[in-house]
Structures are given as C-alpha cells and as structure tokens.
Amino acid sequence: MSSGACTVNTVLIDLSGTIHIEDTEIPGSVKALERLQKSKVNIKFVTNTTKESKRVLLERLHSIGFNVKGEEIFTSLTAARYLIEQRKLHPLLMVDEKALEDFEGVSTENQDAVVVGLAPEKFDYNTMNQAFRLILSGAPLIAIHKGRYYKRKDGLALGPGPFVTALEFATGQKADIVGKPELSFFLSAVEEFSVAPSQCIMIGDDIYDDIGGAQNTGMQGILVKTGKYRDGDETKIHPPPRFVAKNFSEAVDFILTLIL
Amino acid sequence: MSSGACTVNTVLIDLSGTIHIEDTEIPGSVKALERLQKSKVNIKFVTNTTKESKRVLLERLHSIGFNVKGEEIFTSLTAARYLIEQRKLHPLLMVDEKALEDFEGVSTENQDAVVVGLAPEKFDYNTMNQAFRLILSGAPLIAIHKGRYYKRKDGLALGPGPFVTALEFATGQKADIVGKPELSFFLSAVEEFSVAPSQCIMIGDDIYDDIGGAQNTGMQGILVKTGKYRDGDETKIHPPPRFVAKNFSEAVDFILTLIL
C-alpha cells in the first residue's frame, strides 16, 4: 500500500460539479457512491450553499438516484447554525427565504449577531443599516461564505462577499466565515466521527475551496476534473492535491486502494 | 511677516462645522467672511456633500446671511461632474434624488461609468448588480467619497464607503474618489485661479479631510476648533496645521496678516 500511515476512514464529498451538475448525474457517480458505501467508510457531503436548505439538496440528490441521508449532508448553512447554537446567539438572519428552514427553532428576538448569506431581498439599505448597528453594538458578523459573485442564467451576479465586506469596512470588524475553505468548516463536518484529519480525504472540483481548504486542515484532497475544473488547476496549490482524478468514479477507485 | 515666501492669494473654506452648523452661523463668521472678501483674495467654499445640491447649499448660506455666489462653491458632486465631463462618461448615477440636479444635462444612456454617493434608495441588490456588471465590463467606479458612516437623527447610518467597498471587492477594481481628502479635489477647486498650491490656504474643522488633504497637495491648512474638532486633533497629522484658530473669525484674521 503506497499511502503509508495515511489510513483513510472518512470521505468528504463536494456536491455540485463533483457528483452532479444541477439535476444531472456526473456519469458513474451513483454507482461509485454505492461502491464507497459498501466499504464502510464514514461519508459526509459538504457544500457551500447559502440558499438551498438541506431538504432541497436531499430531494435533488434522491431524484438523481443517489442514496444519501439527511444527516450525511453538511452545508455552510449547517455550519452557521452550529456556530449560532454553540455561542447561544440570536441572529439577524440575512439569508434567503429558502434557507430559513435550516434555521428553524433559532431565536431571532433580541438580536445579538448578524448572519449573512446570499439574500438579494435583504441587501437593501435599511437591513444593511440594521446589521451595521448590531455589529457596532458588539454583535459578531458571521458570513456563510465570502464569494465575490456567481454565475446566474442572465450573467454574473453579486455573491454575499461584497455585502459582508461592506459591513466589515463600515464597522472595522472582521467576519467569521463558516463555509469552505475555512478550517473550522471541515473539522465541524467530521466532528461526530472522532477521527484525525489525516484519516480524512476530500473529493471536490474546486482547487482552492475544496482541496486547498481540506489540505490546510491536514486532510488529503482529490481534485476531480469535472464541474468548475480548468486545465492546470492542480498546480495552483502547494502541496498539490493527493490525487487528481478524471471524475468522482475514478476518485472512489483510488480511495478504495487506500482503505483495502 | 513670518510667512516668508508663502504669499496667500486663495482661500478654501469648508462649510458645515466651519462657518455654520445646520441653519446656524458659527458666531462671527458672516462678518469675518466680509473682511476676507474685502481683501480681494480668491475664495472657494469646498464641501464633501453627497446629497445636497449646490442650489440647496447656496440657499442655506444665504438664509444665514452669508454673501456667497454659486460659482464660489465647489462640492464633491461638482468634482464628480467635472470628472465625468472630462472623461466624456455616461454614468449610472447612484446618487440621492436631491443631488441629481447637479448632474443635469449629463447623459446616462449607454452607461459606461458608475458614480456612487450616499443613495439609500439605490443601494438595493439589483442596482448594485447593475453597477457590478458595468464595472466588470470596463466602466470606471467613481466614489463621491468613501465615508464609512454618518450621524443621523436616529443614530449612526451607513455612508457611501461600504457600498463602494462592496463593488471594489466584487470587481477587484479600485474606485476613483473625488471628494476630500483627495489631492485632485483641492487642485480642481482652485484650477480656475491658476495659482500654485503654496499660495492657497484651507480652513476647516476636519483634521484629516480638510487639513491633511489640503496640506498633502502643498497648500497650507488652518484648523478651526468648531464643528467636529476634538481636543488634540491638531497633533494627529504631520506636519501639523499651519495654524490652529479658535474659530473661522480668528482664522480669517490670521490670513489677513499673511496677505497684508
């Protein structure tokens, strides 16, 4: 076995661009996931969504044919909720209506924190000002992630990052970022398994957020050449990915050689 | 005469906090301005407004009793318009409705620039996104100024700065700032007089934006202890202000000793 001391028992898997693109399977991914599941490793699906709730993600994965359970999905919204509960915060939730169900039961009275996701309908002056005043009065600023922009059907559109940056600039306070590539995101995702980072391997199509982020925690990373992958991405981080796979199926086959 | 080669022939005067506060004269300022006007120096009133048009400012000054002409006022809105005309731009104007009259005649068809002032009703996601796309397509980002926040009757409120910063973060493009303390603001204000910066003196209550900004261009600066002045402000910049005056009236008397 070439991996030496690196016995893998936990696999983190990115969703969009890695095992599916919108409502379509990346070919071979359903079968590959089944092979991985038979091997009895811990599995966690990790994604940087700011507006799709866990339920919506799960429905999509099921409709494509993936055998996934709700508790196997860890999203940046989950991470935000985790942080809120840990710190017993009552946040102003600047998140999309569709994401609100992931915060069910969280008290938003007597607000003492600000959580920012991608929430176009909440990026108006009055809500921004409300957030500004809360932060000035000592409330932490929590960002789901700090993405600059994303691709929409009609072209590029602003992500949550610019609005987080606006609040940082106004208040002089840095945001706590909860999504990938933050170290705490990866560690929280596998916390229930009580494993060392070196026993974890992350599969994803984003060289910085998935692979760089995971490897910075001491996990290993497998870059797949699907989704947002562009030629040469594997050379953009040091150390480079543990392995570069044509797709998720090949990534799984590589992992199976590590755990057999 | 202690000023040596520094023969002053041009005086720049801040408005709010220097000669008036809202609708009230800072005592002695009307008479002091008359003394200064008799001395035949060039006079320009310079202010960082983002929403009061020149007409509104002029009406207020007249109602207080100041003898000021429209062409003697140079504002950050004037500076923005100046820049727009110089570069023949067709801007998306993210400025307050009340400021729009200072841009009368400026074409906003086939937009190729973004101008940002304090415009709460235009800081919604769709307008921000429109600005973002324009900048990505090569349009310059012009900021009236980059103030973080300002004091409103109901408390602190976000200034234009955070929204400018949001667009900078999203696009990776730095804004051109036109208001104080930018070098170009002071130079544009006195351009018509064809004078050297060393012949100009600026009177204001803001140690950074008025005095630091002016002195960085080679002008001299007189800090007045009215308006936003706080104890010790005069020690916050190097070199310190040329002179620190109790108020505008004392500042004028000092200047008269320089030009006699």
Image: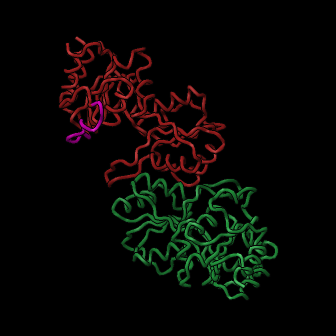
Chain colours: A green, B red
Q: Is residue B236 magenta?
A: yes
Question: Is residue B95 toward the left or the right of residue A65 in the image?
Answer: left
Q: Residue at x 58, y 67 (%)?
A: A50
Image-based side of B131 in relation to B6, left or right: right
**Quadrant where the N terminus of chain A is found in the figure:** bottom right
Residue A254's place in the image compared with A140, above or below, is below
Residue B9 vertical placement versus A225 (above, below) = above
Q: Is residue A202 left or right of residue A166?
A: right
Q: Estimate the x, y position of residue A191 in percent, counting from the top left.
A: 53, 81
So how many labels did they put on this image? Answer: 0
> Which quarter shows the C terminus of chain A?
bottom right
Q: Give the residue drawn at x 40%, y 21%.
A: B190
Which of A72 and A61 lies nearest the eye of the viewer? Answer: A72
Please name whichever residue, B155 or A189, is drawn nearer the observer in this view of the structure: A189
Q: Residue at x 56, y 85 (%)?
A: A193
Dominant SS in magenta: loop
| Residue A55 seen in render | no
Task: Determine if residue B147 is in view.
Answer: yes
Numbered range of the magenta stretch: B228-239
Q: Nearer the viewer, residue B173 or B61?
A: B173
Residue for point 23% across, 32% down: B224
Q: Which of the 4 image quarters holds residue A100?
A: bottom right
User: Which image quadrant for residue B30?
Assistant: top left
Nearer-the-camera pick, B254 or A228: A228
Task: Give the percent coordinates (x, y) of residue A24.
Answer: 78, 72
x then y, percent, for residue A242: 68, 68
Q: Residue furthest right?
A: A27
Magenta region includes residue A226: no
